[in-house]
Image: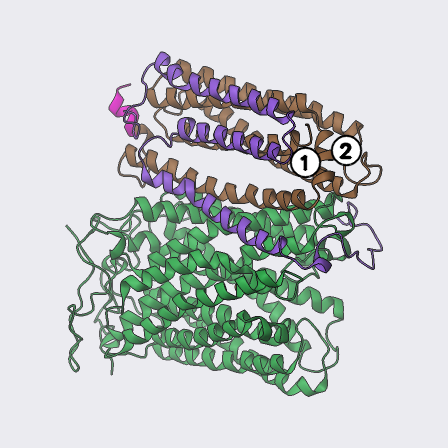
Amino acid sequence: MSDIAARNAALRQPWRSLRRQREGAAFGIWIFLGSEVMFFGCALLTFAVYRSLWPDAFAAAARETNITYGTVNTALLLTSSLTMAAAAEGAAAGLRRLTLCCLAATVAFGIGFLVVKGFEYQEDITKHLVPGAGFRLEAPQAQIFFAFYWLLTGVHAVHLSTGIGIATVLGIQAWRGSRMLASPAFEALGLYWHFVDLVWVFLYPLLYLGGRS
Amino acid sequence: MTGLGEERPASTAGIWRATLPVWAGLMVLLVATLVGAYLELGRFNLVLSLGIAVAKAALVVVFFMQLKRPDPLLRLAACAGLVFLAFMFTLTYADVLTRAPPTQPGTVMPRSIPDRPAAGQRAF
Amino acid sequence: MSGITAERAIPGAPPREPSYLTAKTGLASWLLTTDHKRIALLYMAAITVFFFVGGAGAVAIRIELFTPQADLLSADAYNRAFTFHGVIMVWFFLIPSIPNILGNFLLPLMIGAKDLAFPRLNLASWYIFMAAGGLAVYTLLSGGVDTGWTFYTPLTTAFSNGNVLAAAAAVFVSGFSTIATAVNFIATVHLQRAPGLTWFRLPLFVWAIYATSIVMVLATPVLAMVLALIFAERAFGIPIFDPLRGGDPILFQHLFWFYSHPAVYIMVLPSFGVISELVTCYARRRVFGYNFMVYAILWISLVGFLVWGHHMFVSGQSLFASLAFSLLSFIVAVPSAIKVFNWTATLYRGQIVFDAPMIYALGFIGLFTIGGLTGLFLASVPVDIHVTDTYFVVAHFHYIMVGGAVSALYGGLAFWWPKITGRLYPEGWARFAAIMMFFGFGFTFFPMFIMGYLGMPRRYHVYPEEFQVWHVLASAGAVILAFAYLLPMGFFAWSLIWGRRAPANPWGATGLEWQTSSPPPEENFHTPPVVEQGPYNYHPEHAGPPALEREQHQPQGRQP
Ligand SMILES: [Cu+2]
């Protein structure tokens, strides 16, 4: 298919040009990410206030998290961002093979993250790190730390699963040829994926690295 | 062809040349923050680990999320959330750090506790 | 008597062109439409239903308060009634009403676009809204909530017997719809404006919707997260605000009001936009100080984020923070005052026509001024400590939200009704309804200022007998108000069948939306317009309109 025809096929109402449509998609996602910043920021503010109120209990609680799993997962996600960036660039450059391979790798890294997370959750449950009766640590404030641990990692996992789902759909569409590589969806997915990665970049030091020294 | 990207790489090799160094930088920072967490720095442990997180975020935002492209609209949208987040942190801490002792959390305990636990059974 | 009404006497109906209403038929063409105009009508239908549902709560409250004893509702049922009234009216009526009905319909028309930037997202947002509404109705049917619309913890997390989780889920889901719409509006204003329509040529309604969308995008997620925290604490028993385990309930209030104060601006900023359109058209004047009107809107949406602590003066928040929030609250009153002064100045030397939309607009300005000034009482710490949780507060925010936002909604609906439906509403009835709304509102809510000042606390279903006279007055006023709300629904519906056909521009207004046919074709403009001048060209610049004969207005754009 010629270049012009491919671009016309990717252009949608009400946009006047593909260039503007791409800018619109990126801009729309960026606004949405601004919204997401406030969403996670709200929880992080709550976490920060409690951390400054109860530093010792939070340090003791942070020592209980499994740093190996956390570090491996950070590396997995950062690498998935690399493949995602390559996939988005490849789609913009019209490189079909690179795009498909990198999307597949991204999905694989994402699923790998969730699998590791699952093992970690299982270990946390057996170690009685779920807030409530029979909690492992003495200080009641340590339960607040683990309330946030479960909540933040859980919400992050939901976001990541959404990203994996969208990446899978886009990958299949691109493979079948029902979605043009010129479509702005790849870049939009990339922005979302990198944001989910960024959330983890901040969760990692807050949840895993505290109280280690 | 590439829409917004004026100087985007057009070949597979070019794309890897542009992205792999960023990834390498991220990995170096990851090792640095892991090692830094075990150093005895007192309260500066947090400063160090969050500083490295900000550096990682900057790498991702600038290179992977393409904010290096000169599009003021996208840069503006990316900054808006951070500005309002700063407002939220500042004014909330303005209260938390200056509160009178009796209303600091942990100083006054509730006199009554719920007759039934709220968890689970009264879900929906 | 008036120049504007004279134009309506157009002999014979103009030939009907195909419009967005007739372009496609069948239920699927409505439920699967991506046309912003049809989606606006879908929202109108849904929001009208929620207005009735929330209104039913208000009816129950006013009937119960007719006598000092508890006759109709138990204490618990009363709690559930006012909570439900608040939740439905705030999240399912006031917040979506003007942006999603008038904004959805008018924003692309006013900027000369074919549609919103992301048409399918727009439709998805309606379905999310309906899902949230379904959850809210489920909450009501399964027993309701007794916590008040503010969801304060530890009441919500540990003590309440109501259906807190379902209510929180409903509000959480509705937030997605709000954010999706807001993203759509922002992208549309940035990227879909007609050639020549620079930022400072935008009608003030577009500016208002744009600023509202920014507030929606940045405030709504905070509410979503804080409700998720409440949800998790109640459903799974994990401690987040639990004071027994070191949690801080005041922190919840910070986060809740970080959303809920800007939410007031989500409700009232779109009204500002509507009023600016109405006042200029019916005074035949350029808006006074256009640039300052724009800066005021932006200033409100920025500083509106910095004042939330004025809801927490008695919560145990530090005195230092209270003083800071008090000062910032006084500052945010300045741009609102600028807007009121500029509307008033716009009227000066205008050829004022007292048609129904103008009556609504003038009512808005008066009621909003009272609501805003009493807001200053509440922003000063000593007065607020005296009247916290009394009917003074209730009266204050109803002046802003009901007297303000609902007046503007009805005025805007009347003004753009010919554009939306292609039919003219009966002017005499509409004037009657507008006047009735003003007086009904006054009778309902002004007594609340007095009894609140005298110490009547809010959220009680029994009260000392000395307050009965005020409560009876309020309940009687509410009856008038209810008729003033129902009457327009009646004659709007009547006009759909028997109303006269509307010409493209029945009021001689200048905006781009009036330069396409009424109702507009599916693609909005047969030829995309080009804009060459600013809004509100009701008379030549630097010269007032001639006193006696009607001036010549100039439409904002032209068809190339
Ligand atoms: Cu407020």
Identify the residue at horizontal 63%, vertical 49% (top origin).
C227
Lower sequence index among marks 1 and 2? 2
For chain C, give the colour: green
Q: Are marks 1 and 2 in contact (CB under 8 Å)?
A: yes
Q: How many marks?
A: 2
Which chain appears brown? A
User: Callout 2: helix, strand or loop?
Assistant: loop
How many neighbours does mark 2 have within 10 angstroms: few (below 14), some (14-19), or many (20 or more)?
A: many
For chain B, give the colour: purple
In the image: residue C549, left or right of residue C178: left
Amino acid type, callout 1 = Tyr
Q: Quadrant of the N terminus of chain B?
A: top left
Mark number, residue A129: 2
The image quadrant of residue A182 is: top left
- Tell whether position C466 is magenta: no
> In the figure, A96 relative to C484: above or below?
above
User: Callout 1: helix, strand or loop?
Assistant: helix
Amino acid type, callout 2 = Leu
Residue ID for mark 1: A149
Q: Nearer the viewer, residue C301 or C486?
A: C301
How far across and how far down the image is residue C155, in percent? 73, 58
How far across and how far down the image is residue C233, in percent? 71, 46
Whether residue A118 is visible, yes or no, is yes
Q: Which residues are magenta?
A: A1-8
Mark number, residue C509: none
